[in-house]
Image (spheres, rainbow, N blue to C red):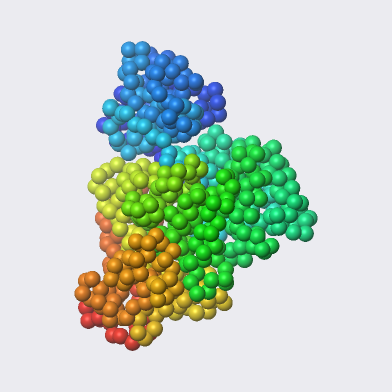
Amino acid sequence: AEDGYDLWLRYRLLAPEQAKFYKNRATELIAGSSTPTQSVTRGELLRGLQGLLGRDVPLSDSVTRDNAIIVGTPRSSALIAQLHLDTQHLGHDGYVIRNVVVDGHAATAIVAQEDMGALYGAFHFLRLLETGQAIDHLDLHETPRVKLRVLNHWDYLNGQVERGYAGASIWDWWKLPDWRAPRYTDYARANASIGINGTVLDNVNAGATILTSTYLQKVAALADVFRPYGIRVYLSIRFSSPIEIGGLKTADPLDPQVQAWWQAKADEIYKLIPDFGGFLVKANSEGQPGPEDYQRSHADGANMLANALAPHGGIVMWRAFVYSASNPEDRAKQAYDEFKPLDGRFRANVLVQVKNGPVDFQPREPFHPLFGAMPKTPLMTEFEITKEYLGFATHLVYLGPLFEEVLSADTMAHGKGSMVAKVIDGSLDGHALTGMAGVANIGTDRDWCGSDFNQANWYVFGRLAWNPSLSSRAIAEEWVRMTFSNDQAFVKPVVEMMMGSREAAVDYMTPLGLLHLMGPGHHYGPAPWDASESSADWRPVYYHRANRQGIGFDRSRSGSDAVDQYAAPLAAQFNDLKQTPEQYLLYFHHIGWDYRMRSGHTLWYELVAHYTQGVDDVKRMRQTWLGLHGYIDEQRYEQTAAFLTIQEKEAQWWRDASIGYFQSISGLPLPPAYASPP
Ligand code: GCU
């Protein structure tokens, strides 16, 4: 039975004509095995080709016939060296896949400068086969645009995953370091196949225990498993660790004893894990300790850790998600207010990690105003792959369009064309240290992610981290082909369904720029009426501000003036009600229920229409899926069908609850078009 464990690396036998075609073009494999990375590259190709073609492809040391596959670097392979390809520019991770002639025989060469590039190239080659691509005239050049492509696991050491909907943490701390579960290797394979090269093992709400020697041994064991796949391990650290496990009285970053403690800790880590990546830090946010506890700045805190890691080549990813009672007027402004003044004050090995939007991973938010606003600091973007605010495990929401919308947003920081993607890949302000982080949706469920379609969100994150300009639609198609089927009659409707799914969720949850209307705490289901949370800015009513007259959060110059955190042309645009894109309308403006939208309808009408549209879209998604019975295995088919039924029911719940509540505030009747029951 298909349980989703193999993710997109299924390597099931291709359709007969396809398998035959590729068989003739993969007659033997020439791949070294003198390093761990070479071995896993060779192993993956053997495994993949065997599965896809249904027969073992023989290994060889030389080219003995036409259509061999040759993999390696000029240093590792004399055959590759004799091709005289320029590999210098490929760097550590890049590769070329090209049809060549070697010793008088046609061959396909996967060529890199370093072993890692060859592994990435091998995965790419297998993807071509898995997705049914032509491989006769290959001349592919790939280098990643972003250097650090990192998963953030929000895993506690007790096995719980914060905002995880796919079972417990896959890190079995009790059995580590001596038991290295095979799952760790499969995790590394999956990540390497999409270019992910770093993983933060523990939650940003970190305890100090992870830095004790006992746990560092366990971390080292995982690092050993991941190393051949080019994946570095990072840790979230608790800023007050010197007090909690170091016996110091303070964690003040300017205190010499504190600095010495972190230096010694870094030395200890690197003795165990020579290629340790570095630290991720959540400080002075949601109750976490941090430098501000000692009247020091975020830069003081980050630089102190950066100093400890620098001699070893490590980096600090310092989060800009700061969220405290200090900005009750408008929570959305806090990160910018605190971090913008620190631009230029961070050490060279510090990146500031910024959530994609200013509030918190909502179905839709405008891009974060820090992008483009800190030219002297490398900024990472942080996406949430796990669907904390998007229906947890069951709702089918493909996040590719959300990620793409953010990456392609124009910050206007240096005029037109200053896309978030260019901030992230360093090209806008000339940064070599670049990164993209995704909060993982991985757990102990057999399918890793809580549903088959959630795997696509892990996949698209990795692909976009490699190249932030890829289209989310193209990535969806790749993923569907690898995960399910190459049958066009299946691929097309499923890709359509995925591409529309995020907008559907926006419509049935929080249309027109509304956000954070989920039940407080758990964040599942509608609760726009909720005013119970202790802190004002946790309450849904804080965000929508609906009253008898109208709805929306006034962030214009007559309100909180969050608009002026954006570059001047955007600030002017967002400040002007008429020019604000309607998808952000209620994020930037508080407007009357009878306000005329571009459609000519009133806001109230349009709000109801969007909620209804969301439900209709999910109904259509379900119909689409029902029409696809028989194209894939029963097990995965049935689960998706059941989950879509849940989603349809809950989209209706969202619509009815939201409209019912807003109606109780506005006092308006349902627009006639929506008044009669369907
Ligand atoms: C959200 C989420 C928290 C998480 C926080 C963060 O608020 O609900 O669980 O800890 O983001 O990103 O730090």
Residue 187 x %, y %: 51, 43
Residue 479 x %, y %: 36, 45
Q: Quadrant of the C terminus?
A: bottom left
Residue 358 x %, y %: 46, 63
Residue at position x 48%, y 44% in the image:
431
Residue at position x 30%, y 74% in the image:
607
Q: Nearer the viewer, residue 35 or 584?
A: 584
Left or right, 85 with respect to 270, comes to left
Q: Is residue 373 above or below residue 667?
A: above
Q: Nearer the viewer, residue 437 or 222?
A: 437
Q: Nearer the viewer, residue 11 or 92?
A: 92
Count how many numbered circles sit on residues in the image. Answer: 0
Tell me which corner region of the image, top left, top right, bottom left or bottom right, holds residue 512.
Answer: bottom left
Q: Nearer the viewer, residue 515 or 65?
A: 515
Tell me which corner region of the image, top left, top right, bottom left or bottom right, holds residue 278.
Answer: top right
Residue 340 visible at all: yes
Q: Is residue 540 above or below residue 290?
A: below
